[in-house]
Each structure stands twice: as C-alpha cells, then as structure tokens.
Amino acid sequence: MARRALKLASWTSMALAASGFYLYSNKYLDPNDFGAVRVGRAVATVHLRSARRLCELCCANRGTFIKVGQHLGALDYLLPQEYTRTLKVLHSQAPQSSMEDVRQVIREDLGKEIHELFVSFDDTPLGAASLAQVHKAVLHDGRTVAVKVQHPKVQAQSSKDILLMEVLVLAVKQLFPEFEFMWLVDEAKKNLPLELDFLNEGRNAEKVAQMLKHFDFLKVPRIYWELSTKRVLLMEFVDGGQVNDRDYMERNKIDVNKISRHLGKMYSEMIFVNGFVHCDPHPGNVLVRKRPDTGGAEIVLLDHGLYQVLTDEFRLDYCHLWQSLIWTDMERVKKYSQRLGAGALYPLLACMLTARSWHSVNRGISHASVTASEDSEIRDNAATYLPQISQLLNHVPRQMLLIFKTNDLLRGIEAALGTRASASSFLNMSRCCIRALAAHNKRNACSFFRRTRISFSEAFHLWQISLYELTLRVKGLRLAGWVSALLCWLLPAPH
C-alpha cells in the first residue's frame, strides 16, 4: 500500500521514495500491504500502518527523504487522509539537531558563543525541517529574532542523497523502462546547493518582499545580515498559525476565504507577472496571523531557499494556457500545451495543472465545482497514468517541474481550507495573465498608437472580469436572500 501511495502522491518524488522502500523492505514493508494494493482492498488500518512506516523512513534518513515526506503530507486532495495526517508532522517537527550541534554551527560561522550574541536563546526549536531548525532568541539590543541554523551534517549528506537518488533512478529505469526520472536527479543537483546557501535565501526574501510590496496582506520577515552566513540566517521573529490550520483561523476570527484569495493573488503575481516563484509553500512555510497594527489578516511567507525563475517565453505561454483553461478555449489549450512540450499528451497536462478531470476541463473549470466523486476519480486514476506522466515530465520545460510542485502544495492548502477551485481565484489568475501579456505586448510595440490600443484592450478585459465578478456576487446575494426567505416561510418565528 505504501508503494501505491507513493505513486499516487508525487511524480517528482516517486522514484526516490519507492526505491527507498525497496532498500528498507525487510524493516518497513509488510508483504500483505502489496496484496491489498493488487486486489484493491486497502483499508484505513493498512493506510495508517504504511504511512507511519513511511514517516519513520523519512525521519531515519533525514535530508532529501524529509523533503519527500513534506511534499506528500501536503497532498490532501490526492492522498488518503491517513498519509497526509501522519506526514504533516514533517512540515515543522522533523528530527532535530542537538543544542551542542547548534552551538557548534554558530561558533564556527559567527565566531562567538551563543551567550555572547544573545540575551536569551530558546533551546527548544520553534520548528525543524529537512535542512535546518529555527530557534527564538533575543539580541542584546532587545530585538526578538528567529535564528535558522543548518543541520551540521546536511551538506555532506545532501551529496550522498543525490548520488543515491541517481543510482535508484537508474535502477528504476532498468526495472521499468517506460519510466524516465533522470530529470529528478538533474533538478536536485541544481536546487539543493541553492537551498543550502542561506545567504541566497536572504537575497530571495528581500527580492520577493520588494516585488510584492503592494500587497499589504503579505509579510516577509526582515533579514539581519550582520549575523547571517551560509549556514546561519537571522531574521525578524514573526508568530502565527499554519495556513492549513482552519481551527486556528476560526479561533482568531481570520476569514478563511480571504486568506485563500490572498494566497492565490500572491502566487498568480509571482508566476504570471514577475516570473519569480517561491516553490516551497508547504504549510510550515506559510503562516497566517492578525496584523498587530490594523487587526487585518496577514500571510507570513517563510523559507525562501527555493525559487524558480521563469523565462519570458515560458511565462507567456503559461499565461496563454491558463487563460485558455479558465475560459474553456480548447483549441488554444491544445496549442499552448503543445508549445510547452506536451505533444499528444496535452489533455494529461491540462488535468495535471488543474487537478481536474478531462470532463471538467471541457465543461469549464471556472464553472464546475470540484465534487467528491471527481476527487475520487483523480485518486483512483493517478497510478494508472504513471507511464504517461513520466513521459510528459520528461518532455516539458524544466521550469514546469517546480511549478507542478508549487501547484500541488497550494492545492493541498486549499483542500485543507475547503476553498478549492473557487471562481474568484480563477478570475484573479486571469487578471494577472491579462496584465502580463499586455505588459509584454507594450514593451514590443513599435508606436505610441499601438501601445495605447494595447492599454485600452487591457483595461477593457479587466473591466469585463470585474463586471463578471460583480455579477457572481449579486447572484450569490440573491440566492442567499431566496434561501433566507424560504427558511423564514418554512420556519416561522415563534410567537
């Protein structure tokens, strides 16, 4: 069952995780699980047992294995809840380094002992993840800070993880020639060194804060460069609840739908307009809180080690593709899917991007709500199409791979909040696509008249979307009024 869960969970991590299970089979696998998978009789107890063993495997191996588990734990819309509930612990409560290890890293990188740098330093970390853990501390000038300290052995371990991944991918290809996963190794080789450089993370944090400064609902903690190195990152301390914690939001009177809309706006701006995308939005990296000054809802974006920079060509084709999906222009869906390397598998690309069935894509994803039966259909069919998924991922631009991961994590958050596939989120995406395409066309326009025409066209299309959104709201209010009147008629107030 665990092996099937890995297949269903994430094409970007399947080769590593499935092969890891093979290597540890004597300790972690029960042959009865495979029988249950083959005949389709898996039950909750099998799911739970397999999920716990997967969690143990990730914690035992740390590093890349924990990153795999974090991704799987965020796939609420795809995996059985026994897996997601069990693996969610890896978002912020992964295995910790000892305080002696923490002191050693700080001593080596900053040249001083902890008591020389801080008035107080909490021994118990606020959270621990695959590459580092975070401690709360107070500087001598009174500032409360978060200190991110890299696990001391993770640099050496990461190179071994990548080598192991390469061996396992080659082994999987020998066993299953239809699976092409060497791109997974290439991406890990490129991204892991960047994630391990905390100075790069600090630069990314400042860049995205400047890029999205017009969003008053977004908070990116300030970086304190004077006490930051490649393995230690000092930043402003900001508290909050995880973005998938609906109970926390209800207790603190934070509007769940508003948070979901804000998150969609933020990522649409990053992907479609700026082409600079935070690619690790698992719930441990996205917090929510009430702003201390205004009391309004605020999103706190953490962990800026992994970003994808999109080329203009890819970004514009991606804009066109999403516009076509939102407005159900199937000819253009085919055209721009094929421009992005999907070939004859363009229906599969559309389904993977939207996490909707092909039937829903054809009906219109902005019109048809996600149903339980559709979710079940996607779960049941995911493993069936693994060879085609493998083939597709081997042909799309490499930029698309982290976009898939980001979409997975965001969709998992929406599923946890109960806000998946709302019309307003698609309209916000469409606004960003229109702005991005117009900006590109204006840059390439050769005359003032042409730029003016583009500006008028942009304004008109944005006005159309606003009018359509207003119409939806009015319909919603009218429906609410009708329901309220009906209830009053059916249940008259007692005299």
Image (cartoon, grey):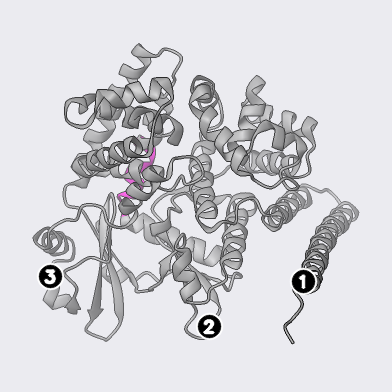
Give the class, few, some or many, for how many residues have Cα within 10 Å of label 3's Cα (few <14, many ≥20). few
Report the residue marked by disc 1: 484
Report the mark closest to the observer, 2 or 1.
1
Nearer-N-terminus badge (1/3): 3
Report the residue marked by disc 3: 112
Q: Residue at x 38, y 61 (%)?
A: 202
Corner quadrant of residue 225: bottom left
The disc placed on residue 295 is 2
Main SS class of the magenta portion in the image: helix
Q: Residue at x 33, y 23 (%)?
A: 34
Of residues 226 and 493, which is closer to you in this image?
A: 493
Looking at the rendering, the stretch of residues picked out in magenta corresponds to 189-197
Give the class, few, some or many, for how many residues have Cα within 10 Å of label 1's Cα (few <14, many ≥20). few
Q: Is label 3 in a helix, a strand or a loop?
A: loop
Corner quadrant of residue 99: bottom left
Q: Is residue 191 magenta?
A: yes
Q: Amino acid at mark 2?
A: Gly
Nearer-N-terminus badge (2/3): 3
Image location of residue 109, percent across then percent down: 18, 61
Of residues 32 and 143, which is closer to you in this image?
A: 32
**Structural distance between the alpha carbons of marks 1 and 3:** 66 Å
**Structural distance between the alpha carbons of marks 2 and 1:** 31 Å
Image location of residue 97, percent across then percent down: 16, 56
Quadrant (top left, top right, bottom left, bottom right) of the N terminus: top left
Query: Where is 403 relative to 255, above or below?
Result: above
Image location of residue 283, percent across then percent down: 42, 57
Query: Where is 230 relative to 444, above or below?
Result: below
